[in-house]
Image (cartoon, rainbow, N blue to C red):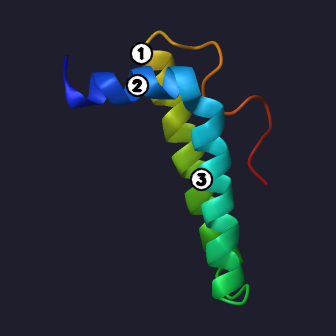
Amino acid sequence: MSFMDKVKGMLGQHGDKADRGMEKSGNTLDERTGGKHSDKIDTGTEKGQESMDRWTQEGGQGEGGGRSGGSAA
């Protein structure tokens, strides 16, 4: 089993936690930069969450992983 297979498996089981962690990290960065880079931080967070969703789906672990619903603003 490769490293990426292990990551995909963990995201399938704990995607919601990874999603919350990424969101919290983005919020922390936004606060520390005084909101100067909010648009870029939001874009990076959304792309990271989309990547997690793709990895989860590719690993066959679609249930319970990644974000649910929503669209890019």
Q: Is residue 22 left or right of residue 31?
A: left
Looking at the image, is mark 3 or mark 1 nearer the viewer?
A: 3
Residue 39 in view: no
**Percent of width and height locating residue 39:** 68, 72
Mark 2 crowd level (few <14, some 14–19, many ≥20, 10 Å Cα): many
**Percent of width and height locating residue 66:** 61, 31
Task: Give the alpha-carbon distance from disc 3 to disc 1, as whole Å.
Answer: 20 Å
Mark 3 crowd level (few <14, some 14–19, many ≥20, 10 Å Cα): some
Q: Residue at x 80, y 37 (%)?
A: 70
Residue 39 or residue 63, whichever sits in front = 63
Q: Amino acid at mark 2?
A: Lys
The answer to whether mark 1 and mark 2 are in CB contact below 8 A is yes
Check residue 59 in the rendering and tell me which mark sits there, or answer none.
Answer: 1
Task: Give the alpha-carbon distance from disc 1 to disc 2, as whole Å.
Answer: 6 Å
- Quick one: quadrant of the C terminus? bottom right
| Element marked by disc 3 | helix
Q: Residue at x 68, y 46 (%)?
A: 20
**Percent of width and height locating residue 38:** 70, 76
Instruction: Determine which residue is flagged by label 2.
Output: 8
Hey, which quadrant is residue 16 in on the image? Answer: top right
**Image: 17 above or below 8:** below
Q: Is residue 7 left or right of residue 43?
A: left
| Element marked by disc 1 | loop
Hey, which quadrant is residue 17 in on the image? Answer: top right
Mark 1 crowd level (few <14, some 14–19, many ≥20, 10 Å Cα): some
Residue 36 in view: yes
The answer to whether mark 3 and mark 1 are in CB contact below 8 A is no
Q: Amino acid at mark 1?
A: Gly
| Element marked by disc 2 | helix
Mark 2 or mark 3: name the one nearer the start of the chain.
Answer: 2
Instruction: Determine which residue is flagged by label 3.
Output: 22
